[in-house]
Image: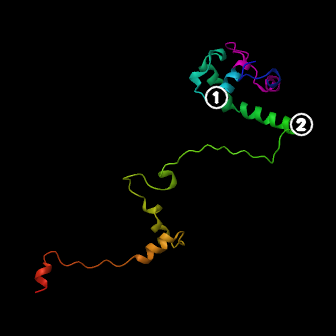
Amino acid sequence: MRRHALSDEEWSAIEPLVPPPKETGRRRGDARQMVDGMLWCLRTGAPWRDLPDRFGPWQTVYHWFNAWTKNGTWDHILEALQIRLDAAGHIDWDLWCVDGSHIRASRAAAGAGKRGAIQNPENTLWAARAADSAANCTWLLTAAACLSPPKSHPASDTNRRSSRR
């Protein structure tokens, strides 16, 4: 048995859950070989194009994986295996595993505008004040307290030096 291949016991648990082949059309490939190829890609994290030749053409394995994902076959297999393992007492429902990977979000995803983009006035902090909403941060309170009326500027034709004489 190869490193990423299913054992006979594992395959016997999954085989009845695999959709049967269609009666018309081309004869399909070996389902176990396709499942082994799908699991190889998922376990190694390699791109589909790097799938070893022993699993068949990568396009076929990817097609099966994509079709089974869309039609719910993988969900059905997972649900059936969980029911079987829970009945045997092999699942600890108090154990939670959290994925440790993360993806950095852009500034725009956090609510900030893109560089050079015009901000929508309906989404600014001032819109909450205009809608009589309560302030949701101290910046808004500080900014509201600092607002002052515009200062008057001298007329453009007046020279400051000449007005002091």
Q: Residue at x 46, y 63 (%)?
A: 124
Rendering coords of residue 100 (x, y %): 64, 44
Q: Taking 63 as reference, is 16 left or right?
A: right
Q: Please rate how many residues cluster around mark 1, counting C-alpha atoms within 10 Å: few if below 14, some from 14 to 19, many from 20.
A: few
Camera-nearest residue between 137 and 95: 95
Task: Give the residue pinned by disc 1.
Answer: 44
Camera-nearest residue between 104 and 154: 104
Q: Quadrant of residue 19?
A: top right
State how the image is colored.
rainbow
Amino acid under disc 2? Ala
Task: Give the residue pinned by disc 2.
Answer: 88
Q: Is residue 91 above or below residue 149?
A: above
- Image quarter of the C terminus: bottom left
Q: Residue furthest front?
A: 3
Q: Is residue 122 above or below residue 55?
A: below
Whichever of labels 2 and 1 marks the residue nearer the N terminus, that label is 1
